[in-house]
Image (cartoon, rainbow, N blue to C red):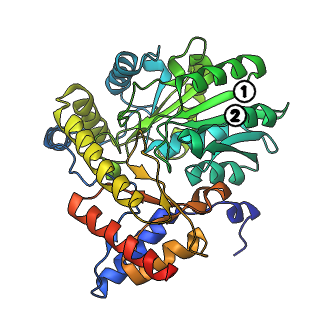
Amino acid sequence: MRFTQRMGRIVTAASFDMLARGKALEAQGRSVIHLGIGEPDFDTPKHIQKAAGDAMAAGWTHYGPAAGLPDFRKAIAASWKARRGIPCEAAHVVVTPGAKQVLLFAMMALLEPGDEVIIPSPAFPNYASIANFLDARVVPTPLLPEKHFDLDLDALRARITDRTRMLILNTPHNPTGGALSDATLHAIRELVLKHGFTVVSDDIYGDMLYDGKYTAFGSLPDMFERTVTVDGFSKTYAMTGWRLGFGIMNEPLAKHMATLMNNSSSCVPPFIQKAGIAALEGPQDELKAMVEEFRKRREVVVNGLNAIPGVHCPMPPGAFYAFPRVDGTGLTSGQIADRLLDEAGVVTLPGTGFGAEGEGYIRLSYANSIPNLTEGVRRIAEFLAGVRA
C-alpha cells in the first residue's frame, strides 16, 4: 500500500496522545492528574440530553439536509445575531460534525496549493495541519506575551503578500487563554478591506471570556461577507462527544460547504441537531454556572503557578487554559511535559505542540476540579524544584 505525500503533512493533536499516555499509566495503578485535554469536565445539561432522547423516540434518526435541519439553522442564526451581533440568516449557516469540519471545508473551498495562510502562533495545531495537508503555505505570526498574547500587528502587516488568501483568528485563544483586543480586531478589519483576504474566525470560546465584552469579528462593519465564523457546542454546553459544530459564512460559500458535507458526512444526526435547538432555546443557567466555576479555577491555577520560582503565567482573560513560561530548567517544553507525566503524574502539553513560538511554555487545562488542580500545581512545583536542585 502506497500512501500519498500529503499524509506526511498532517499531524495528530498532542492532547489526545498525552491523554492516552496518562490513561495507560492509570491502568498501571499510577495516580495521574489530567491537565491536558481541552474538554469541560461537566456533564451535558439534562434538558439537552432529554431533547436528544425525545427526538430519537420521535423518529429523528434518518438522513437530514446536508447543511442542517432548517429549524436548527434558523435557531443558530437567530441566536448568533442576538448574542454576537453577526448579521446572519439561516441560509448562512452550515451544521457540521464538530467545528473542525468547518475549518477543513473552508480551507478546501478557498485555498489553492501555494496560497498563503497567516496563522497566529502559538495556535491550535489543526490550523497549520489542515493548511499543510492542502499544500497551502503556513505563515506564522507571533502573539505577544507581554501584551497578554494579543497579536503583533506590525508582524502581521509585514507578512501580508499578494499570495495571502486567509487569516485565522481565535479569540479567546487556545493555547494561551489570551484574547484579541478590540483595537486589534479593528486594525485587522482595515487590513482585510485593503488586501481582500478572508478571515476564518474560530469563536469556539466566545462564551468563556471572564474579562471584558466579547466582540465577534464577523459582527464588525463590512466583515460578514469576508468572514467564516467557526463555532459549536462542545465547549459552551459541555458537548464534546456529541460532535456538533457549525459555520456562519456568506451564502455562496455556504452552498459549497453543504456540497462538501454531502460528499463526506452526509449530515449531522438529526436527533443531535434537535438537542442543539434545546441547548440554544432552553435555560442557560448551567452554562453561566460553568463559566463562573472556570473563573474560580483560573485564579487557583494561575496564582499557584506564579508562586513557583521560575514560573511566570499571565492571567488569561478567556477559555480554560493557562500557558505558563517555565524558565531555568535546561529542558525543552517537550522534555518538561514528558517528565511531568512520567515522574510527577501530571498531564500537560508542550508549548511547541502549538508552534515554534511555544518553546519555553507548557499548556495546562483547568477543566478539572479545584482539589485536582491544587494537587497538580503542587506536583509541578515539586518536580521543578527537583529539576533545578
Q: Residue at x 42, y 26 (%)?
A: 214
What SS does tag 1 mark?
loop
Q: Residue at x 73, y 73 (%)?
A: 2
Q: N-terminal of the two: label 1 or label 2?
A: 2
In the picture provided, is 108 more to the left or to the right than 13? right
- Give yes or no for contact between labels 1 and 2 (Cβ–Cβ under 8 Å): yes
Q: For the residue marked with disc 1, what is the amino acid?
A: Phe
Q: Residue furthest bottom?
A: 28
Query: Residue 205 appears at what percent x and percent y?
Result: 41, 39
Q: Residue at x 70, y 66 (%)?
A: 8
Q: Is residue 146 placed above or below 70 in the rendered structure?
A: below
When asked about the image quadrant of residue 360, the answer is bottom right
What SS does tag 2 mark?
strand
Query: Residue 294 appears at what percent x and percent y?
Result: 28, 46
Residue tagged 2: 166
Q: Residues within 10 Å of mark 2 (few under 14, many from 20)?
A: many
When asked about the image quadrant of residue 71, the answer is top left
Residue 197, label in figure: 1
Q: Nearer the viewer, residue 234 or 267?
A: 234
In the picture provided, is 49 more to the left or to the right than 168? left
